[in-house]
Amino acid sequence: MGRIKLFSATATATACLLVTAACGGGSDDGSVTLRVGTGLAEQHAWWSDTMVPWMDRVEELTDGDVTFETFTGGELVETPDEIEAVQNGTVDVALLLPIYTPDQFPMAEVTMLPISSSDTLIASEAWRALLESDTELSDGKTFYESQFADSDLLAWPVSTTQEYAISTTGKALDSVAAVRGLSLRTPSRIHEMYASKIGVDSVTIPAVEMFDALSRGAFDGSFYSIADWSGYGFQDLFTYTLTGLDLGHFNGLIGMTQSTWDDLPDAAQEAMTQAHDEVFMEGAQEWVDRSDEMIEYSEDEGGEFVEFDDLDQSVQDHLIEGVEDTWADYIDLLESDDLPGKDVALLWRDLLVEAGGEVPDSIASLD
């Protein structure tokens, strides 16, 4: 896959001052050391199974001429400040999480829209295709041009997370009344929209604080990826999970400034591009593997996983109606800010379906 230039501008002089090897073209022997940062823990799948293999492969392909100095878990930069850290030169490369800053990147949230069926592999292919798409939206620009025009970044996609699900500490979704009585943590604006549409009380709380709050019974559960339970110990708290309804995929990027990229030797650029292509889907598979492990562990401990199709029909209808209304509200939200909301939503839908995903009939018929 070719590299994806998401943004264009000029880099700050700060980057050169902080990391002379990167901005100055490397040392006398041609080697380059890049400072890499993330606010995520080193156990996070994006770091351990995409970023680390990518860096290792780049070092291998360049015979050690490119090396990396790494900082994780907020040691140098905290989430969601990674984009700013790349732009101001605190780090050369970072895991970027644009969904956490919807005021800057409102259309990046499109991958969080709920649908009927998908998985990490499908959504990851669709996410990569969205970034590479040359389809012009209603403003005459492609997705990345329309979304990222004023930033100084070049980036590759990392795989999306596994699909989000509804998990609780015991409450079942066995009636519409039961759904309406839930209080769930919502990790994004789109989940807040969906919660509102199905009558669920929305709780906003950082993931790191959820375990204690759930243990105290402060709320009933969360929209969350099963594959990511182990990072917070949720496998020991969630005992009821609805599967078979895809409630969105979180996305991310490996990014640097355009100027940092331009200062790299051609061999380093080629190695980074090749390494990304090699690790991209392996990183996606890690989410599948982690999910399988969590499900097996939970079931051994008495956890229950209920398929959407096994719910009472009235509950199914209620949840799907919420999906449809959320799409309409997200489109309206973007278009109220003069963004091509409908066009980007339909482009995401088409790429998902092309990759193997499924959407409700009413979403499929939108044009």
Image (cartoon, rainbow, N blue to C red):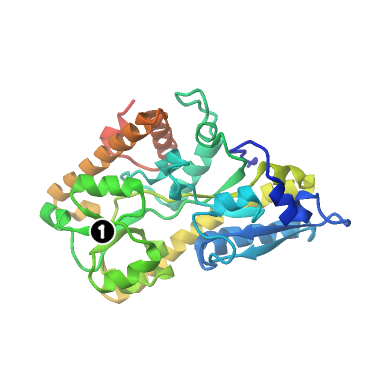
Residue 116, given in percent of the width and then of the height, sits at 30, 45
x then y, percent, for residue 366: 31, 28
Q: Locate residue 358: give its quadrant.
A: top left
Q: Quadrant of the N terminus?
A: top right
Where residue 136 sits in the image (x, y, percent)? 50, 25
Residue 250 in the figure: left or right of residue 322: right
Q: Amino acid at mark 1?
A: Leu
The quadrant in which residue 266 appears is: top right
Check disc 1 and report the residue beneath it: 184
Where in the figure is residue 311, as x and y percent of width and height? 18, 54
Q: Is residue 267 left or right of residue 361?
A: right
- Which residue: 34% across, 33% down? 331
Count of marks, rendered view:
1
Q: Residue at x 60, y 45 (%)?
A: 155
Quarter that holds the C terminus? top left
Q: Residue at x 70, y 51 (%)?
A: 15
Q: Where is 306 relative to 190, above or below?
A: below
**Along the line of sight, which residue is nearer the eye, 38 or 164?**
38
- Residue in view at x 47 percent, y 41 percent: 105
Per the image, label 1 sits on a secondary structure element best described as: strand
Q: Residues within 10 Å of mark 1 (few under 14, many from 20)?
A: many
